[in-house]
Image: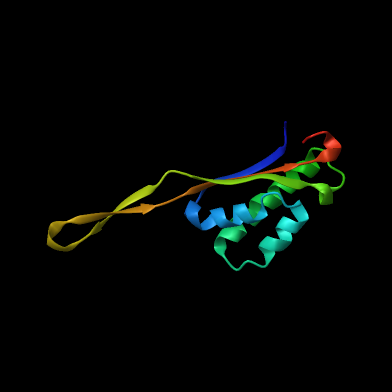
Amino acid sequence: MASVRASHQFARISPTKVRPFADMIRGMSAEQGLNALAYEPNRGARFIESVLKSAIANAEDRGVRNPDRLKISEARVDGGPMFKRVHARARGMANLIRRRTAHIHVAVDAPELGIS
């Protein structure tokens, strides 16, 4: 089964901040997902929203005439590489600071293309 995909690799946000929004829109229609994300005030929702818009645009580019019928089949957030920094502490010790990144993937199914 093929579907139309979009992804944002190396997004500068922790995956744990984005995953609840991916879980929220999974299984919805594309229009419902955009409406749900529009009213979320979090930065993670903006990341998912932009990737979802990209997936819809990719579907239109592949020949989908009615983007209202698109359904979100996959929305997942994977952890990316970490920027590691050192923070000085007392008595000559150091703490490691991990600046996390995320890989955000969204796929939509288009029934009129035969893509399911």
Q: How many marks?
A: 0
- Residue at 16%, 63% in the rendered image: 90
Check the image and name the residue furthest to the top.
1
- Inspect this view and state whether residue 77 appears: yes
State how the image is colored: rainbow
- Residue at 58%, 46% in the rendered image: 76
- Position of the C terminus, as image quadrant, is top right
Image position of 41 (left or right of 56): left
Check the image and name the residue furthest to the left.
91
- Position of the N terminus, as image quadrant, is top right
Residue 63: x and y, percent?
83, 39
Image position of 57 (left or right of 9): right
Q: Nearer the viewer, residue 54 or 30?
A: 30
- Residue at 43%, 43% in the rendered image: 81
- Inspect this view and state whether residue 12 appears: no
Residue 33: x and y, percent?
71, 56
- Residue at 69%, 62% in the rendered image: 36
Residue 29: x and y, percent?
76, 52
Q: Nearer the viewer, residue 56 or 116?
A: 116
Image position of 75 (left or right of 68): left
Residue 60: x and y, percent?
80, 44
